[in-house]
Image (cartoon, coloured by chain):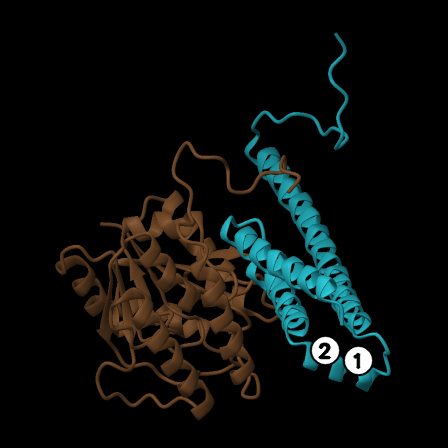
Chain colours: A brown, B cyan
Amino acid sequence: MRKLAIVPAYNEEGSVGRVVADIRQRAPGFDVLVVDDGSTDATAREAEAAGATLLQHPFNLGIGGAVQSGFKYAARHGYDIAVQVDGDGQHDPGYLTKLLDALCNTPGTDMVCGTRFRERTGYRAPLARRVGMIVFSIVLSAITRQRITDPTSGFRMANRRGIELFARDYPHDYPEVEAILMIHAHRLRLLEVPVEMSQRDSGRSSIGKGHSVYYMIKVLLAILVGLFRGRVAVEPGEDAPVSAQRSI
Amino acid sequence: MDSRIQVLAIVVTSILFLLILELVRRRRLMERYALLWLISALVLLNLAIWRNLLEDLASTLGIVYPPNALFVVAFGFVLALLLHFSLAISRLSDETKILAQEVARVDQELRAARAESGAEAPAAQPSVAEPPPR
């Protein structure tokens, strides 16, 4: 069984080397792919020095584009399992075995998501973000009719079905939250697994403190608008989703 | 305010709102661009439905005939949308330039790698190559 760890990294020269080394040490069955999302610092060099395979974007696409590049790589190279491990050090590679176990041994599951909030963990987010997460949690749980406790967690592992879906299409703007809707729309099964995550090691979060409320409103609107979209990725034989021929 | 123009405004803004949602559903329109359209349509719809609100707004702006206030607001949104597009186009131009330069770089590295390995490689052509003479 071929397994890939996708490490999206944007200006994470301080932590990406250690993340790669950690994965190689704690989960040696996983190949490591670092997706350098147009970093302006030494992220790429650090990643290569640590022994990861490197995918470098010519400019910054955002976490959605970076993770999708990882999934495209996984699909193209025939991986059976792909897991997202953030380059900032928040995700603990020690949990990869636990996620893998849950994914492989729970029948019918296509994706597992590490959640910080199932059990009492040490993770404490700033208040504004916590409120946002609770709101998304309620909304997504209602829509998917399944208990979603950590909607913004990017610590996710997918099987071949998930890889092929996300390689074809992955949300641009608020990927973690919108991907849950996508999974639901395509009738894939998501399972949450309790994990512990650390605060960010170094670098800056892409969501500043003052922006939390604005971000929350935008995500809710995106969820609302996204609900109208329904089944997204294209089946073989259908019209190409992106075509230069269409005028409208 | 004449009922006909009010009905027309309500119908048009409603159709616009539904059209945007449908275009997003069909994946022709990205959410980030749809947002400004939806907000515009919603604001205009509200102003069209609630005469009092529109009349208050008109008197605040110093406009005598209230439906003109609706046009002023609509025009304001159109300007905002156009500016938004100019920004998007600027960014896309930048991205396209970077992609072109990246393609050139990868092409050069490929040629260099072929030369090194001694593989057969087609001679360098102008980017817009002439078809071979018959």
- A65 on left or right of A198: right
Say if A133 sits above or below B128 in the image.
below
Q: Mark 2 near mark 1, Cβ–Cβ under 8 Å?
A: yes
Q: Residue at x 83, y 83 (%)?
A: B61
Which chain does the residue under circle 1 lie in? B
Q: Position of residue A167 (x, y in %)?
A: 41, 49
Asked if A54 appears above or below B54 in the picture, the reply is above
> What type is the residue that disc 1 sits on?
Ala
Image quadrant assignment for residue B66 = bottom right
Give the residue number, with chain letter if any, for mark 1.
B58
Residue at 41% across, 31% down: A237
Which residue is the site of mark 2?
B54
**Tag 1 secondary structure:** helix
The location of residue A215, given as percent across then percent down, is: 53, 78
Judge by depth and name the residue closer to the eye, A215 or A225.
A225
Residue A179 in the image, given as x and y percentages of width and height = 39, 62
Image mark 2: chain: B
Give the image quarter of residue A183: bottom left
What amino acid type should be assigned to the residue bearing mark 2?
Answer: Leu
Query: Which residue is at the far top?
Result: B134
Kindly tell me whether residue A49 is visible in this rendering: no
Residue, x 81% and y 84% (percent of image)? B59
